[in-house]
Amino acid sequence: MAKSMPKKKPAEPIIRVRDVTVQFGATKVLDSLDLDVQRGEILGFVGPSGAGKSVLTRTIIGLVPKISGSIEVFGVDLDKANARERRSVERRWGILFQQGALFSSLTVRQNIQFPVREYLKLSQRLLDEITIAKLAMVGLRPEVADRMPSELSGGMIKRVALARALALDPELVFLDEPTSGLDPIGAGEFDELVRTLQRTLGLTVFMVTHDLDSLHTACDRIAVLGDGKIIAAGSMDEMKASRHPWLRQYFHGKRARAVAGA
Ligand SMILES: Nc1ncnc2c1ncn2[C@@H]1O[C@H](COP(=O)(O)OP(=O)(O)OP(=O)(O)O)[C@@H](O)[C@H]1O
Ligand SMILES: [Mg+2]
């Protein structure tokens, strides 16, 4: 009887980081770091400024070399993958960078179409349809497509950058400080948008943020980076209960809410 029961496979992490060390000159930024991101979750990634959050993000996607350790995304070790395998993994993720969220010399339309052109050969008509659909997905009107980034507000830039990250219908998105610089209402709307997209599209989201409100409302789980390692990972309640000095100051400090989003 038991023999015929289908075996439930244990959940495979969508990102598996093991023993990763990254060093610039003599400075070790990441030191034997381990981290799992589970399929379908929104992981909020926090830590002091300069701790290495953006570096880890860029290491996972292969833009920063590591001196040791391994990283698997979708079960593929990117160091061992050939060019074709790498491309097929890259095609399944989208990225919103902390700096230079959009190419300033390209229109919104060209920005959104950029990753699509890189991976797929589609007609201009289809590319334009994708552009309008992605703009709608992030709550922007079709007319925005012909504007330049300099003609957009900060909040619109973040939305367009999200539309570009979603252009290839990814399963996984990396968002590096997506709400920084937005007012609390704009940031709240952005968090809600990310939450809705995660629910409706089944996205997995790796979100670097300083925004305490984002951590409360948008994230399923939080991981904290300090001294090159993950010093804590778990629910908001677990973070608040931690006795670690940085976590206590961050999650309970008087200025915690005032600096959120800074
Ligand atoms: N390409 C590079 N070459 C040399 N040092 C670098 C490079 N990229 C990042 N660093 C250094 O690595 C450290 C971590 O930087 P990182 O940008 O990851 O911080 P962060 O945690 O994202 O900070 P913030 O919250 O301010 O965005 C910093 O000291 C930074 O100066
Ligand atoms: Mg950063």
Image (cartoon, rainbow, N blue to C red):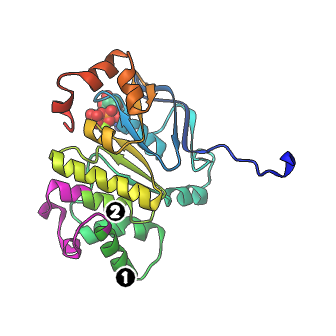
> Looking at the picture, which amino acid does disc 2 mark?
Arg
Question: What x and y, as percent, mark residue 254?
Answer: 18, 22
Question: What x and y, as percent, mark residue 157?
Answer: 21, 58
Q: Secondary structure at mark 1?
A: helix
Q: Secondary structure at mark 2?
A: helix
Residue at the disc numbered 2: 164
Location of residue 46 (image quadrant): top left
Q: Residue 255, can we see it?
A: yes
State the residue at coordinates (18%, 51%): 186
Question: What x and y, as percent, mark residue 66?
Answer: 50, 35
Residue at the disc numbered 1: 124
Residue situated in front as seen by the camera: 208 or 55: 208
Location of residue 114 (image quadrant): bottom left
Please identify the quadrant where the C terminus is shown.
Answer: top left
State the residue at coordinates (34%, 54%): 194
Q: Main secondary structure of the magenta part?
A: helix
Q: Is residue 196 above or below residue 26?
A: below
**155 within the magenta span:** yes
> Looking at the picture, which amino acid does disc 1 mark?
Gln
Q: Is residue 250 left or right of residue 18?
A: left
